[in-house]
Image: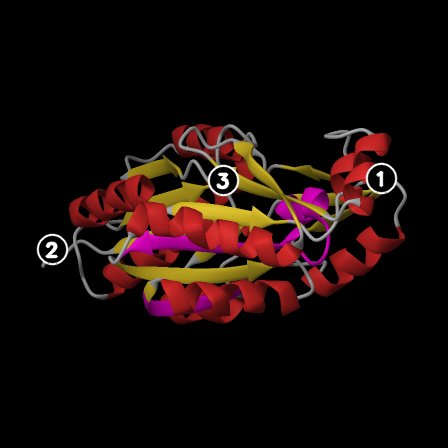
Amino acid sequence: MSAVKVKIITDSTADVPKRVREQLGIEMVPLKVLFGEESFLDTVTISNNEFYERLAKSEMLPKTSQPSPTEFMEMYERQLAQKPDQSIISIHLSSALSGTYQSAVLGSTLLETVNDITVIDSKSASYGCGMLVVTAAEMAAAGESKERILAKIDEMIKNRKIYFLLDTLDYLQKGGRIGKAAALFGSILNIKPILTIDQDGEVSAVDKVRGTKKAMQRIVDLFKQEYGDDAVEMTVGWTHKSELAKELAALAQTQLKVVTIRQTEIGSVIGTHAGPGAAALFITRV
């Protein structure tokens, strides 16, 4: 194994649970959540529960803003001050969805010292990014080289698939993604949109299915088309209410060869547009 130590850094949108970050020594730079004039640090000065409670009461959707380049620079400086010879891998929210990745890149260039920092565009969100972060941190803890960690991240980006199932269309309507009439019509007909994050890192609609049970089976069928009988790792995520997500995960386990399963609550960035009760499965080959 390489003697070089590797530090993993991410942002709050990766939805890596705090206990996992602490266990693996992952550092996190928070995005900001703005309800009107009030500004909060995502998962730091506002919890997921507090966020979803405010979201339910707010007529206007909150806004989110990326960390500044200076905030990233200061994070990198702190880590390098502790271990000047370490390498840093900084993995972030899709550049198609946010300027967070660009801020991290710029922050790395502001350092006055010579350093070894690689900033990665996860081309995903929530645990689609988080799975890269956790795997990288596990490999770093095992003493793997930076080169092997980067190769594994690249492999995972090519092999992962993500599907979201929304419980309500209200938040897409509030965000201007669909019209009020379409949201009302969809709700009356019990239309469930299935969303993904594509290879370019953008959110896109895969299908619209009438009824929750059919929508869940459609998601599992999409995964079966991709992975067949291959062994997979699966993470189930939800926005505030976990019932739908856990039902979806249970269905997937009966039809896919799931060897590892993890859980996470999806935070404010995706939650703003998905609303409470959304379910997501994040899957990659073992």
Q: Which residues are magenta?
A: 258-286
Q: Residue at x 51, y 31 (%)?
A: 202
Residue 103 against residue 49 in the figure, above or below: above
Say which amino acid is labelled 3. Leu
Q: What residue is pinned by disc 2?
A: 2
Query: Seen from this angle, which residue lies furthest left?
Result: 1
Q: CA distance from mark 2 to mark 1?
A: 58 Å
Q: What residue is pinned by disc 1?
A: 184
| Mark 2 vs 1: CB contact within 8 A | no
One can see residue 81 in this view: no
Q: What residue is pinned by disc 3?
A: 93
Residue 285 belongs to the span the image colors magenta:
yes
Give the number of marks.
3
Say which amino acid is labelled 2. Ser
Residue 35 belongs to the span the image colors magenta:
no
Give residue 260's position: percent from left, percent from top. 34, 69
Instruction: Tell me which numbered mark, 2 or 3, is placed earlier along the sequence.
Output: 2
Mark 1, secondary structure of its residue: helix
Give residue 285's position: percent from left, percent from top. 27, 54
Would you identify the image quadrant in which residue 179 lies? top right
Mark 2, secondary structure of its residue: loop
Q: Residue at x 40, y 32 (%)?
A: 199
Q: Nearer the viewer, residue 43 or 190?
A: 190
Q: CA distance from mark 3 to mark 1?
A: 31 Å
Tell me if mark 3 has few (under 14), some (14-19) or many (20+) residues whose alpha carbon lies within 10 angstroms of its own.
Answer: many
- Locate the N terminus and report the quarter of the image it occupies: bottom left
